[in-house]
């Protein structure tokens, strides 16, 4: 059979490379089409890469712990008796880090001599990754930043990867050991001698805790969420508008169709895809909600990619994205919502499925909340929270006069970035979503 390259797939707009964490198959193993053969990690999510065809793994081109670029061949699949075709030199070059220039011995001796004679008058500045002589994958850098591990500390770790590289396993093991107090102390970097008159850097006072308390260390995902939320509040001028919608017709329509839908499709008809359908229609009416900001430029997105905040069993949040939601009918949106929610709970989302969103919705009603003030999912400029649907007495206008009746109501909360979305646009948008929900067609098919 013809030899086929296993290509590292595209994993979102901002993801250009990934670290090979574990090969699930070895050279010489037979694989089925779509069978997972390797686990990869980016700075956003871990996932698996399936085999593009049935055959035998002839050659593994990128080893565990190494970094591959999106679109790069990481393995070759062929027949059992085939010999792997040598990969092109460019592919080999693309997966190796750029060589670091080494100064000549004479220059090193001169620099060291000058440094030994110099008098330091200020505290040394911490290194960044650009100044480190070691190569670190994006995932390792992300974990180090989240866990507060300085580059100097990271440089002291022994790596189990190729050429001594620090792998995801190495740094997570170090973090766990450090939290338990069992991690070996990293050798401190040699610091220059400080001038006697130099003022020492201030040390943050230790937090005093009294009473019966339990100290819980944040996991890596919770730290990433915390950082993302704080940066969003620091970046966007948040304003929230609220609308209460009478969704009685919508509730009655769902009650009419949900049992038949579940019997026909084998899955539930929830309110979330209905809300997304109304949001997509409103975005078409107000396209300046579907934007982002880069410096002093407004980037209007032509695709409508709706993210939906989903709670994980761990209590953390993740936002899978329904791509091109404006091209899907209600059935297609429902299928996408159920599939993404299921795989989010099972930790089986691909990196590309949690990136590229242009607008986000959070269904706080699933927790019994009537409304909330959601934080914008950067770099988007708006997010909507949909609350619980509750029965209320209401005045009903009829041709023969006003009456009192029981109706189904819900709140919509729309947070938007006041730098580019004024109150008129933000308020009209959420009102339009409510109108679409209130005017739901009772004869609509799904």
Image (cartoon, helix red, strand yellow):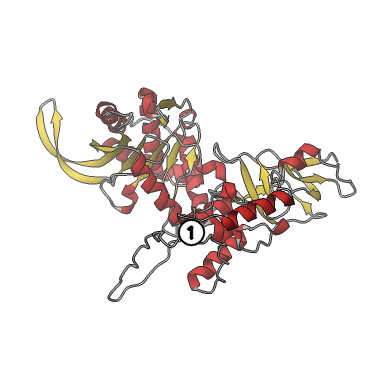
Name the residue: 50% across, 54% down. Answer: 126
The quadrant of the image that shows the C terminus is: top left
State the image coordinates of residue 52 (x, y, percent, origin top left): 72, 42
**Residue positioned 43% across, 56% down in the render:** 222
- Looking at the rendered structure, the secondary structure element under dot 1 is loop
Quadrant assignment, res 255: top left
Residue 373 image position (x, y, % from top left): 28, 44
Q: Which residue is mark 1?
A: 147
Quarter of the image with the N terminus is: top right
Whether 248 is drawn above or below 36: the answer is above
Q: Is residue 346 visible?
A: no
Q: Is residue 66 left or right of residue 268?
A: right
**Which sits in the foreground, 176 or 315?**
176
Residue 306 quadrant: top left
Q: Is residue 267 visible?
A: yes
Q: Nearer the viewer, residue 8 or 243?
A: 8
Say above or below: 402 vs 354: above
Q: Please determine whether, in this image, residue 161 is positioned above or below residue 266.
A: below
Of all residues, the one furthest to the left in this rendering is 401
Query: Does residue 370 appear to the left or right of 326 in the view shown?
Result: left
Spot the residue most to the bottom: 212
């Amino acid at each position: 059979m013809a030899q086929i390259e296993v290509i590292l797939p595209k994993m979102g707009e901002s993801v250009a490379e990934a670290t090979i964490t574990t090969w699930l198959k070895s050279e010489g193993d037979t694989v089925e089409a779509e069978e997972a053969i390797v686990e990869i990690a980016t700075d956003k999510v871990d996932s698996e890469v399936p085999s593009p065809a049935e055959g035998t793994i002839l050659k593994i081109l990128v080893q565990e712990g190494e970094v591959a670029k999106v679109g790069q061949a990481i393995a070759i699949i062929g027949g059992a008796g085939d010999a792997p075709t040598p990969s092109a030199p460019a592919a080999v070059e693309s997966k190796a880090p750029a060589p670091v220039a080494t100064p000549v011995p004479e220059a090193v001796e001169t620099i060291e001599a000058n440094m030994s004679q110099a008098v330091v008058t200020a505290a040394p500045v911490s290194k960044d990754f650009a100044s480190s002589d070691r190569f670190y994958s994006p995932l390792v850098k992300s974990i180090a930043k989240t866990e507060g591990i300085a580059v100097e500390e990271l440089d002291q770790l022994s790596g189990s990867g190729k050429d001594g590289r620090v792998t995801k396993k190495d740094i997570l093991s170090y973090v766990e050991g450090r939290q338990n107090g069992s991690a070996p102390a990293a050798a401190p970097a040699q610091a220059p001698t400080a001038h006697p008159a130099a003022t020492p850097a201030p040390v943050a006072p230790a937090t005093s805790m009294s009473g019966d308390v339990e100290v819980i260390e944040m996991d890596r995902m919770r730290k990433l969420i915390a950082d993302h939320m704080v940066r969003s509040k620091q970046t966007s001028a948040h304003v929230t508008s609220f609308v209460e919608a009478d969704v009685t017709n919508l509730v009655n329509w769902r009650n009419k169709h949900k049992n038949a839908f579940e019997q026909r499709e084998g899955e539930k008809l929830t309110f979330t895809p209905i809300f997304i359908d109304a949001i997509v229609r409103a975005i078409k009416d107000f396209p300046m909600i579907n934007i982002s900001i880069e410096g002093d430029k407004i980037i209007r997105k032509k695709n409508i990619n709706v993210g939906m905040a989903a709670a994980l069993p761990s209590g953390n949040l993740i936002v899978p994205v329904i791509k091109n939601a404006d091209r899907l009918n209600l059935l297609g949106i429902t299928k996408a919502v159920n599939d993404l929610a299921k795989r989010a709970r099972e930790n089986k989302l691909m990196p590309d499925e949690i990136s590229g969103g242009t607008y986000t919705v959070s269904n706080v009603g699933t927790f019994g909340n009537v409304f909330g003030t959601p934080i914008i999912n950067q770099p988007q400029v708006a997010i909507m929270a949909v609350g619980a649907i509750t029965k209320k007495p209401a005045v009903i206008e009829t041709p023969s006069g006003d009456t009192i009746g029981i109706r189904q109501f819900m709140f919509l909360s729309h947070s938007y970035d006041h730098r580019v979305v004024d109150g008129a646009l933000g308020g009209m948008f959420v009102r339009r979503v409510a109108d679409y929900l209130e005017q739901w067609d009772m004869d609509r098919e799904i």
